[in-house]
Amino acid sequence: MKTKLVSGKLERVTSELLVVFAFDAAEKKQPAKETKPAIKLLTTGNAVAEATAAILSSGEFAAGSCETVLLHAPSGFKAERILLVGLGKVTPSEVRKAAGAAVRFAKPRKLRELSIAIPSSEGLDPFAATRALVEGAYIGDFDPDTYRSDRKDQSIEQLSVVSDGADQAAVDAGLREGVIIGEAQNFTRSLVNEPGNVMTPTVLGEKATEMCRQYGLKCEVYGADKLKELKMGAFWGVTKGSEEPPALIVMTYEPKSAPATPVLGLVGKGITFDTGGISIKAADGMEKMKYDMAGGAAMIGAMQAIAQLKPAVKVIGIVCAAENMPSGNAMKPGDVQIAMSGKSIEIINTDAEGRLVLADGLSYARQLGATHLIDAATLTGACVVALGMVNAGSFSNNEETYKHFSDALQISGERFWRLPLEDEYAEQIKSTIADMMNTGGSRWGGAITAAMFLKEFAEDTPWIHLDIAGVAWTEEPKPWIAKGPSGIPVRTITEWVRSYAK
Ligand code: BES
Ligand code: ZN
Ligand code: ZN
């Protein structure tokens, strides 16, 4: 998708589809049904209001979130069609979704080009609105049907962002950032979408290398020898049952403008397929476990965005990529593995493999000088039980770094809910033979005991853990996003990093 900025009056825009956002300004009283909608268009000038007057007065369009109505051959307009898209509320998050819905409206109708008017409203920052609009358009443009023989590539070729000429600098900057972040998020989605037979640890390493070369980052991809050299017994325990070699991916962003500290360490779980290992999973739904590398893919996408946004802060991105397979060489329940940090782990369940690879990833990030850590992983089914598929789980051992994270959420619009880390939970992972077990003695609080396990390896470094098991894959298509990989939490990680350069 190419993007460009067009300034001028909406009626003069030549386009197959001109998109304008609207909302219901009526004060909501109870019962809601009795409140008459008062639809407001987020445009400057009256032309769109005049052309759509009949629709607006018909009561057929309530301007609810992502609600659409189409008008052909609007009078007085050069555009062939006007699409009104509702915003539930006038916020950047709603703008992001509405732009995605507009793109997903256009795609199956064989429209390859569209123009979206930047919403103008007093309560909306033009930079944030433009950025969210462009991000949303990219998100909407992604479809996962890569391997379908009847795939009709319906991608949008040209997106024009239409400005009324005000706030030019803010709009320009919003467009630029929106493209960078939208592309990074879709890059992550494309990695997560690949099946396990294609996206092996080696291929994930190649994709990271390619991205780093393109955007000027340093990248190293290490194999089994390095794991042994670093004494990464936890990571090794997971990978040793597979014929596919592991990949320890290390991406470095070190701009000259950055001070010596902080050094931010991003650590992602890159299990390219999780069978569960010897503690094998049930067949039902196992195919989904190709997305068990979504945390790692998010770190690769975030590094791509960081390389282009160029914040003045050092960042190290680490992905621990492996396949979790049962075999004659596989790790067994009861085995004891010694992690890179020297801590011993009694393996109770080989399906709790994510925390093992991350344990060594976190230790390695610290060894490389990370002063602040963030990890992302499709870590536990328990997190999905706790929070469903709306919010992902977040955890932290440090209030200050978590403040950076919650501020980043305000910008990214992604949704995380903080869960507790308290010493009592660690009782559940105490082992008689080793320093800890890799799963809790009971299944209660499974997302928390997994986080408590990781906390042992973050040690005294400020750290955030993101359990994205429930949100990395969108199970039901939505008006603004296809079913499939979501690319969460690329946007938040990127903003968290940028917050340290402010
Ligand atoms: N990759 C899974 C977690 C997962 C579950 C991701 C559902 C996405 C959707 C993880 O490796 C796993 O298998 N966790 C186990 C841990 C248990 C054995 C303590 C789980 O959640 O059941
Ligand atoms: Zn598992
Ligand atoms: Zn897993």
Image: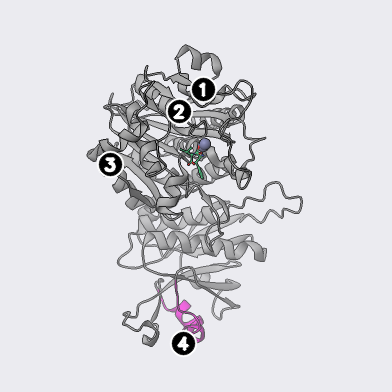
> What is the three-letter code of the residue carrying label 4?
Ser
Q: Position of residue 5 (x, y in %)?
A: 48, 56
Badge 2 marks a residue whose secondary structure is helix
- Residue 145 appearing in the image: yes
Outermost residue toward the right in this view:
149
Q: Which residue is mark 2?
A: 356
* Mark 4 to mark 2 CA distance (whole Å): 60 Å
Label 1: few (<14), some or many (≥20) within 10 Å? many
> What is the three-letter code of the residue carrying label 2?
Leu
Residue 219 magenta-highlighted: no
What label does residue 237 carry, if any?
A: 1
* Mark 1 to mark 2 CA distance (whole Å): 8 Å
Image height check: is 362 above or below 121? above
Give the mark, 3 or 4, whose residue is nearer the N terminus.
Answer: 4
**Span colored in magenta:** 45-64
Give the mark, 1 or 4, whose residue is nearer the N terminus.
Answer: 4
